[in-house]
Image (tube, rainbow, N blue to C red):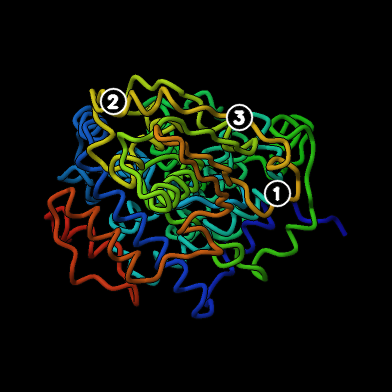
Amino acid sequence: MKTPSIARRFAGFACGLERVDSEVRTAANRAMLDTLGVILAGGAHPSARALAEATRGEGRAALATGGRADAEAAALVNGTAAHVWDFDDTSYTGIMHGSAVVLPAAMALAQELGSGADALRRAFIAGSEVAYALADLCTHEHYFRGWWSTVTLGLTGATAAAGCLLALDEDAMTSAIGLAAAASGGGKAVLGTDAKPLLVGETARRAVTFARAARAGLSGPEDAFEDERGFLKLLNQGAAVEAELETIGRRWRLCDPGLLFKTSPVCSAALAAIEQMNALMAELGASADEVAGVHSEVPQLVYESLVFPNPATPQEMQFSLPYALACAALHGRVRFEDLAPGAVSPEKAAIMARVSVKRAPDLSTDAMRRKYPESIRLTLTLKDGRSAAGFCGAARGMPERPLSDEELLEKFRAAGAYAGVSLHEVEIEDFDPVAVFEQAVGVKRD
């Protein structure tokens, strides 16, 4: 008997998903709530507003920027908004921002179809688990080869989520997933540019289109992953840990290993650095104007992610370790207002000039990559000669140091407040993203 293709195995899982236990349900609610908050904050970002203006249309799906559009346009705009601040969750299963792709696609279709909260949650869980299982199949080497896993892996997951809402049968879902696998691509050259959030939105939009095409009867390549001209050969040098396919639906990656929920709107690789800088400043009782030098030792992932020592644009600021450390010294974190044109003040520039960054081989071993992928060893020296050093393996918000429900709600409310929306009545239990979103952006379902 022939082994089912990877696309069909993913399709069988997504189509067969019915009930999940309370732990998975809660994990999904937390991820959807956090993502919806950053979508709302992203709706106030100039880039998301410019994109919405350029893609005006009509439809039933609400936009974070206000108004409505069809599901494809809404997935594009809201997906861009979800990632424009780089404040959305991260999965270290594939080093990717899965929720920012899956939720906008699923939510746009749910609004168009009038789907309820349970159907949306099921689609989100199915899409997330498919994306993260594909990530484990490919391993972290996919990311380190230069592929931007958020879009290369997220497209398959978001397509599965869209297919769930469209009630595709297994054959149609297999075609939709095959289309996504054959169309996948995207390199990390996008870091530090508007292309990064835009491609998240574009990936969500394509997922809706592929699911619609499959429902209309268009076929996709069932062996799009395994084919000699397919995903694994072209995007992963043929490597695949096929045993990971056996775990889908048994190991729920939304819970194990879980997600990182960010505490500052920057690349996750900077979060441990911000936390450690705060700790050393407190230990020494120092103020920002006393900083004489900051020596950073980082693992490979941090070194490859934070690539702008002297950022010139808001997008580059989100991928700059010296900038994150300067903001930490001055404010304790990176704020929304620190990511604006001209936000590199003379005070920040002075601190940035005193930061050195070195890739540390002992922090880049396979064992350390698995345990502490975005760690930092930091030494802070003050002008009076005093110094302190410390190591942060996992920042607050990482799966092993999770934010509490109340902390997550606090972040959610703050994101809404930035967009001028009060979200104080929202709770995580039985969270309904569509109802909250439509109320927040001032539109009502017909």
Give whichever of 388, 263 is nearer the camera.
388
Please state the horizontal and vertical placement of residue 333, each as a whole percent of the image: 34, 46
Which of these two is toward me, 9 or 167?
9
Extreme residue toward the front, this view? 384
Image height of 158 relative to 148, above or below:
below
Q: Are marks 2 and 1 in contact (CB under 8 Å)?
A: no
Q: Nearer the viewer, mark 3 or mark 2?
A: 3
Q: Report which residue position mark 3 lands on.
A: 358
**Tag count:** 3
Q: Residue 165, position in %: x, y?
A: 43, 60
The residue closer to the viewer here, 417 or 61, is: 417
x, y (%) of residue 4? 77, 55
Please, what is the three-letter code of the amino acid marked with disc 2? Val
User: Circle 2 is placed at which residue position?
Assistant: 344
The kind of residue on which mark 1 rests is Met
Identify the secondary structure beneath mark 2: loop
Distance between mark 2 and mark 1 Cα atoms: 33 Å
State which tag comes first along the sequence, 3 or 2.
2
